[in-house]
Image (cartoon, helix red, strand yellow):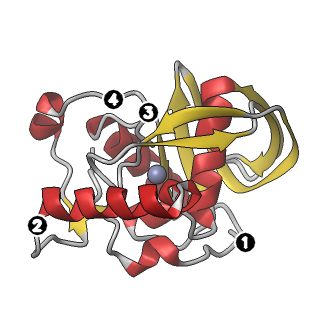
Amino acid sequence: MSLLDIYLLDAPILREVTRPVGEVTEDLRRLAKDMFDTMYAAKGIGLAAPQVGRHERLFVVDVEGAKHVLINPEILAAEGSDVGEEGCLSIPDVYGDVERATRVLMRALDLDGKVFELEAKDLLARCLQHELDHLNGKLFIDYLSLLKRRSAIAKYRKTHGEERPISRKIVAAEAAEHHHRDEEF
Ligand code: ZN
């Protein structure tokens, strides 16, 4: 099992747009496996490649047993809207209400390079939209009002200090003690 470092709010890579995957290679399959391991250790339900310092257009999710790897994902349809609380493994200790579509239909490649469609609702739909945003350099705090965004960033900086790092190590033992929140993607 290999756990990857998770990049944090101040890391420039979180603001970069990822590159479409040309071919699903063994390296990419290993990356997806390491991302699942890292996500589980960090007690998250989704993790996107930029969060572990990679530029590939890929993310993993595991929401209530619905476990998926999405490569080059795109939204085909979205409907409904609902406001719900979100957090992010790249912005520890910060939460905010975000309006998302309640149902989405996405198309992506799987780890065999085959096209598949995924229909999702509620928390899985929210998670998919949050992760897709990561691939476009967007974070959930971008949806908050200016005031709420400012206070979220201020809280993050205060909690993590002046000398805060741009990435954090995920270790299995520490993860077990980490306070679990279902809303962290
Ligand atoms: Zn996130």
- Mark 2 vs mark 4, CA separation in Å: 22 Å
**Which residue, given by chain and number where applicable, does mark 1 sit on?**
22
Identity of the residue drawn at 38% across and 37% down: 44
Q: Which is nearer the N-term, disc 2 or disc 1?
A: 1
Q: Quadrant of residue 155?
A: bottom left
Identity of the residue drawn at 57% across and 65% down: 138
- Mark 2 vs mark 3, CA separation in Å: 24 Å
Residue 181 shows which numbered tag?
Answer: 4
Specify the quadrant that holds the N terminus.
top left
Q: Are marks 2 and 4 in contact (CB under 8 Å)?
A: no
Can you tell which of label 2 and label 4 is closer to the viewer?
2
**Secondary structure under badge 1?**
loop
**Which residue, given by chain and number where applicable, does mark 2 sit on?**
161
Q: Are marks 4 and 3 in contact (CB under 8 Å)?
A: yes
**Secondary structure under badge 4?**
loop
The image shows residue 91, relative to residue 175, as above or below, that is below
- Mark 4 vs mark 1, CA separation in Å: 35 Å
Q: Are marks 4 and 1 in contact (CB under 8 Å)?
A: no
